[in-house]
Image: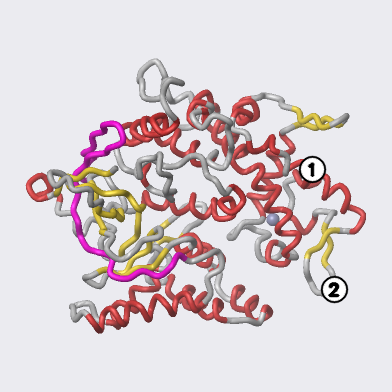
Amino acid sequence: MLYLLSIDEHWCHKSMFHVSADLRYRLVPGYETSWRSLLKLFQMPWWTRVWVQQEFALARGAQFVVGNVMVPASLANDFYKSYANHLPPGSCCHESVTWRMTSELWDDITQKRLALWGSSAVRMMHLSRTQGNAKKNPGTALRELLWLLRTKESTDPRDKVYGVLGLLSEVSLSEQTLLKPDYSLTASQTLARCTQYLIETEGDLMALVGPRTRRSDLPSWVPDLVPQDRRGALVSFQNISKRISCAGLFSAASGKGLDCSFSGTELRTSGRRLMKVQEALPPFQNRIDYGGIRQCRDLVRTAAQNAPSSRSPERLSGALWRLTLRDTVVGATNRRASARDWICWNILSVWLGEQDPSKRSVMAASHPDFARISKSFLVAMQSQSFFVTDDVHMGLGYETQPGDEVWILAGGKVPFILRPVADGRDQEARYTLVGDCFVEGIMDGERADVASWDTSAERIVIC
Ligand SMILES: [Zn+2]
């Protein structure tokens, strides 16, 4: 079964599937036992361990041994590649096969793919480096690797960092001390040092972009590499990865360089406080229907009517479509949205409200960019909460609430949401990081005012 799945061919040619009378792809009955067995194999805890990634990614000729059966591990990678080449939105078999799989079949494939996801990506990353491709910034390489392996588990949380360093030829442990394995440090200190390394080595705040978890033992600016809810997190994992990589398309601080210092659990930096969150909707879930867009529209209309400003309700409605894409169209190469994407977005917005599956298929097939735009919409909105600020700007961010503040920080490509901490110490303004955000109208440095940064930006502590 693994061999059949690993062949790089159009998925309509794979012999284990057939198209039933209702035009859905299903498993051919004789294949069910081996399909279930393979699913069991991919559900084994081995796939979730962080240390095995190193063996798997660096091995020249690994073999899987299960009972008395031995197969080349490369088949698992080839399966992942065949999946990635044919089934995702924008690929050759997406419309003809992916869309027509029964939901049970699709769930099974998702399970198998997720077991492989981090491992295969790590292996491909490693291969592309050994084949002499340009060297990445070591901070970027490590940040991407840690994110890919975020869903993997290690008995000792410090090994989430130490266990992957062997995969990176870019990171030279003799030249710097922040990452040197030191088991006298706590897990939280290890992760804080690692984050400091990423920020200083990349020279920007990309390490702060992405979801945060509120763990009391971690400073808010340190990403939690030990997620509690593995299954739930996995489903949206790839979309969030895309969203993080798209943050590089913006320049909210207009090139104003990093201005950070670290001491223990505190990160000091300079920034501009631009606005306050006035009202926020609860975060969107995995399925977003037309009601979601309507809620956003209603919220911003009311806000614009109540707070007379130069931003008319009509203009804000016009900006809403771009916001729901985070002004980005994702694909093999991500790009910023353009005015011509509006037509396709409009089809999507009608599609979201349509219940009839056959009408939905017709709509989806009516525009060549439909798959990309609908994927972009999900990447932009999933697990994000829509908010309106006190000066009637619209934004998307992680679980934000009224009173949170939108900031541009030195070295930040995207703005951040910070929550003031009232702790009685007046000499320094203290905040916790809620997360990165998208706010229309400030993403390209419009409000950075770099020329007067040194005289007018505020100094703050994030803890
Ligand atoms: Zn294909």
Residue 447 appears in the picture as rendered: yes
The amino acid sitting under disc 2 is Ala
Gap between marks 2 and 1 measured at Cα: 27 Å
* Residue range (magenta): 256-283
Q: Residue at x 75, y 55 (%)?
A: 11
Magenta highlight on residue 10: no
Give the camera-side residue of 463 and 383. Answer: 463
The residue pinned by badge 2 equals 21
Give the numbered dot on residue 2.
Answer: 1
Q: Residue at x 26, y 33 (%)?
A: 262
Q: Quadrant of the C terminus?
A: top left
Q: Quadrant of residue 92?
A: bottom right
The amino acid sitting under disc 1 is Leu
Q: Quadrant of ligand 1?
A: bottom right
- Count the marks: 2
Q: Secondary structure at mark 2?
A: loop
| Mark before the other along the chain sequence, 2 or 1 | 1
Local crowd at mark 1 within 10 Å, few (<14), some, or many (≥20)? some
Q: Residue at x 23, y 55 (%)?
A: 445
Magenta highlight on residue 266: yes
Q: Provide residue 65's location: percent of width, then percent of height.
A: 80, 29
Give the numbered dot on residue 34.
Answer: none
